[in-house]
Image: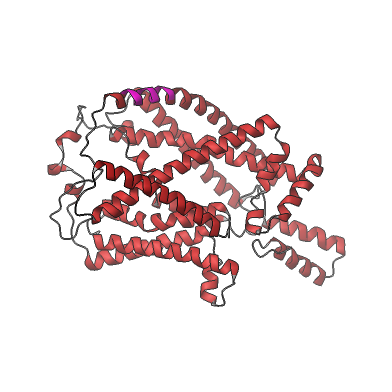
Amino acid sequence: EADGENPKGELLAESLEAGFKAGGTQAEVLAASMEHYRSRDSMVNPFKIAGKKDFNFWFYLMGAWLTFYAGRIWQGTQGYNASATTPHEARMSNILATFRSLPIALFTVVLPLCAFAFFNSEAFAEQSAAARGFIDSVGNPNIARQMATPQALMAVLPAGLKGCLVALMLAAFISTNDTYMHSWGSIFIQDVVMPFRKEPFSQKAHMLALRLSILGVCAFIFVFSMIFRQTEYIVMFWNITGAIFTGGAGAVVIGGLYWKRGSTGAAWAAMVTGSTLSVGSIFLRQIHAAHPLANPVLAFIASKNGMVLAFWSSAIAVATYVLVSLIRGGSFNMDEMLHRGAYAVAEDKHDIATEPVRGWRALLGFTKEFSRADKWVYSLAVAWMLLQVGVFIIGTIYGLVADIPDTAWVTYWKFHLWAFFLLSAITAVWFLVGGLRDLREMFRRLSAVKLDEADDGVVAHESGQSQSNP
């Protein structure tokens, strides 16, 4: 069956037609066609994914670009990014995030694998038939095809373990949504409302405005969820909705911090371009899902997934930023903005040795702030990264010159998952003990801090530049 979303059926139909034209028997044609089909689309071999429409080579390549482009700029995590007491602690928290992501990656890979086994094993034929019946009853095909894992877990997990999983997902849901509600609610008041006020809020009015803004975010989430039509995989939806901000913000941050010709006008142009393209793409997909567009250009855009649309939104925003900066950019004093050289702030300096770091320490990026424990953690993170890069390079070269059978790839993925499982178990214990210790230290610091009632979150700054970086 060719469902329009994945061309597997079309590939099989083409090979069947070619086989019958060549005069083969029915059995020979079917066997050859299935072999051709398998060779184009493998579940385990990354070199055989030509038949995949969405999660193919380009998906991962564009994902790598967006990971670099949008690094550390997502507004939903700005509270975490800005909460470190020193620049070194901020750097180490980013390193620790390397290990924090391991259990999450393991969780999101193992559960779908269990679901795949559930739907394809004869041992679960009766239970999977009931689950398939429920999935088939879902009206929206884009939701139905993402219900496989939840239905499999509902069928195979015992009551106690099922409850633990639901509690875990509920906790993750609450921790994620309260972060976003507070982030977007406070961002709206601090960055949108307050700059237009001639007089600052009183403390009581400021708190009320923040609470109402957070409530407004909740209301928006509710209304949006009621009218939104699911048109693609959730991860694709994340990419295109995230690009509403990151599509232009990446160009603003990278250009503003590393290019002296970057200007405020270029920043606004990039933000407007990225946001407009992303929001427009979402609307086009919504319209096209309900009433297919007759315009071939608009229909072509609406047919692309969220990753593709997010990539092009960011690419066009970058081009816009560069073009406007070249036309109207100035020559900005980067040292003044970054408080370097003659503009260094004395309070930002720490009592550490100023001798330059040399040798292998400099190669690894060690500075004088690194303790012995920091060096071990940093070295382990670098070693893990280099190991994965080495496996990728060697595996890519070997896969291009030799045909690696699927059985070998299954063995590789087994070792890959066991490595993730072992490191995840160590990380869970490590972060539990360290997290409890740091939580106690956080409460100790909060009890000793002196609150400034006049601090309303506004960052005061001066600029004598006519063309200033944002």
Is 216 positioned to the left or the right of 7 in the image? left
The residue furthest bottom is 295
Rendered view: 305 above or below 169: below
Q: Position of residue 58 (x, y in %)?
A: 53, 57
The residue at the point 78 percent across, 69 percent down is 17
The residue at the point 64 percent across, 49 percent down is 45
Q: Is residue 441 magenta?
A: yes
Q: Position of residue 425 (x, y in %)?
A: 55, 27
Question: Which residues lie in the magenta part?
Answer: 436-444
Q: Is residue 409 magenta?
A: no
Q: Nearer the viewer, residue 141 or 51?
A: 141
The residue at the point 71 percent across, 52 percent down is 135
Rendered view: 71 above or below 380: below
Q: Main secondary structure of the magenta part?
A: helix
Exactly how many numbered labels are in the figure? 0
Q: Quadrant of the C terminus?
A: bottom left
Q: Position of residue 317 (x, y in %)?
A: 37, 62
Q: Nearer the viewer, residue 113 or 176?
A: 176
Q: Is residue 396 visible?
A: yes
Q: Is residue 470 visible?
A: no
Rendered view: 356 above or below 179: above
Q: Quadrant of the N terminus?
A: bottom right
Is 202 positioned to the left or the right of 391 in the image? left
Query: Hey, which quadrant is residue 353 in on the image?
Result: top left
Q: Nearer the viewer, residue 288 or 383?
A: 288
Looking at the image, what colour scheme do you see? secondary structure
Q: Position of residue 119 (x, y in %)?
A: 74, 45
Q: Nearer the viewer, residue 30 or 97?
A: 97
